[in-house]
Image: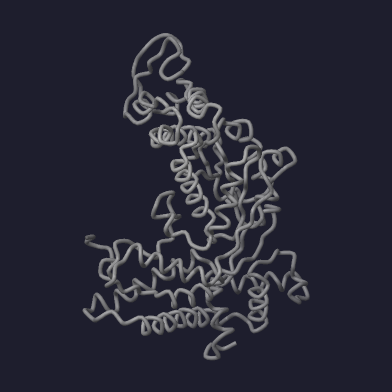
Amino acid sequence: MSLFSIWPAFGFSANPYSQDTLAADETGDQLLVGRDNESYELQRLIGTEGSFPTLEGPIGVGKSSLLEVTAYRMRQACLAAKQGELYIPAVARFQPASDLDALEAEIYRVIAQTLIRYASDFEDAGLFRPNVTELNKWLNASKYSSWQGGGGAFGFEASAGGGEEGNTGEGYTKSGFPTAIRNLLMSAFGEQRGGIVCILDNLELVETVGAARTTLDRLRDRVFNLPNVRWVLTGSRGIVSRARTERLSGIFQAPMRLKPLEDASTVEAIQRRITVFGNDASHPPVTPNGFTFLYAALNSNLREALSTSQEFAQWVHQEYVVKGAAIPGSSELDQLLEAWLFERANSAYEDASRVQPRNWRFFSDLCDAGGRANASEWLSFDFTTQQQYGSAVTQLADANLVVRETDPEDATRKVYVVTALGRLVHFFRSRFQQVPS
């Protein structure tokens, strides 16, 4: 039992409201809810030779979790079928980076570690087990022998000689490691179907479509042509579809778009978490009913709803467990959650007392329009000038209700996005008369 975690006091072995991406394992499989159709479709897209699938959706909708669990399900299906086909999830996801040399090196290392971790799966699936013994020694020892001469270790091409050096970038370069991993991939999978499922995640981190296109173009002939590696590209805000150049359209398919979970699925999702991490005596601070209310208040953003649930759990622990009081029952907890949220929304509204009535009207219109607008859309919100539009955004940004982000289409422009706190304020302003409008 942890000395510091609050969850044992509620009867849980782990945080049932964790925002971490679901892992490619049995627990992740249990916790993925409401995504079976999308998972089946992705399995077909990944398992069909040719161009690679892509996935788009709002930030926090669960794209990475869906992909991790999908790769796990493919692995389990291959092991059960024993038909000489094997798909395995890479042991880590990748994100775009400015240093493409470092990213490429990391990709090869992760592929190597994946082959090491899942080596026994090849036999179980009806394939020959790859020999990764020397690879494991070379990659995971604090020092490795360079084994130079005669082609080197596990296919390394190196000049004659010998010695020992640390596992550094320089050692990586001199070893011929990329060539060795390519050869190992071909020998491991042979002519059979299958491969390693690699995820290039959060393409929006590149900031602009132009930069994303440049990144993908440069990676095209460096890692996207690796044998038996099935890539999946993810991102939000439509950046994936807009980053596909004519040259890249033959490599990446048009994006599959992931929508927020339906309300009924959110109830099941949180109930699964309570069941997996709790027991019959558990007291979930945010009940399935309370989570549904919270999910709606935060505009169906699963990540924000889970994060806010954890904050409420901390408050319940402080107010009841620390003070030696009994944890309230489910109905009372639901009422407490609503009151706690209302207090947060009301406090944020009071902090925004300087926001002018005209700008509150704009804020409501922005929320109703999806919570996102370009800097050029001032006429759509009935502003006489663009300067008035910018001043309204400034007032709302100062109150942490709206944030400015770089427009993925043009790095010189901005887009205005309603924050999670802004969503909460809008929800309560529109639903409860107690908050002034």
The picture places residue 383, in percent across and down from the top left corner, at 75, 75
Q: Residue at x 52, y 41 (%)?
A: 197
Q: Is residue 382 left or right of residue 163?
A: right
Residue found at x 56% / y 36%: 100
Question: Compared to 21, does 328 lie above or below?
Answer: below
Residue 376: percent from left, percent from top: 74, 64
Q: Position of residue 123 (x, y in %)?
A: 41, 32
Q: Nearer the viewer, residue 288 or 344?
A: 288
Task: Decide if residue 158 is on the left or right side of residue 373.
Answer: left
| Colouring convention used in this rendered image of the protein | one colour
Q: Give the total number of marks visible in the rendering.
A: 0
Residue occupying image coordinates x 46% and y 18%: 155
Figure check: 384 above or below 434:
above
Q: Residue at x 23, y 79 (%)?
A: 323
Q: Residue furthest bottom?
A: 433
Q: Nearer the viewer, residue 4 or 393?
A: 4
Which quadrant does the N terminus fall into? bottom left
* Picture quadrant where residue 390 is located: bottom right
The reply, left or right, for residue 249 in relation to residue 433 is: right
Name the side, left or right, on which 214 lies relative to 195. Answer: right
The C terminus: image quadrant: bottom right
Q: Position of residue 333 (x, y in %)?
A: 37, 81
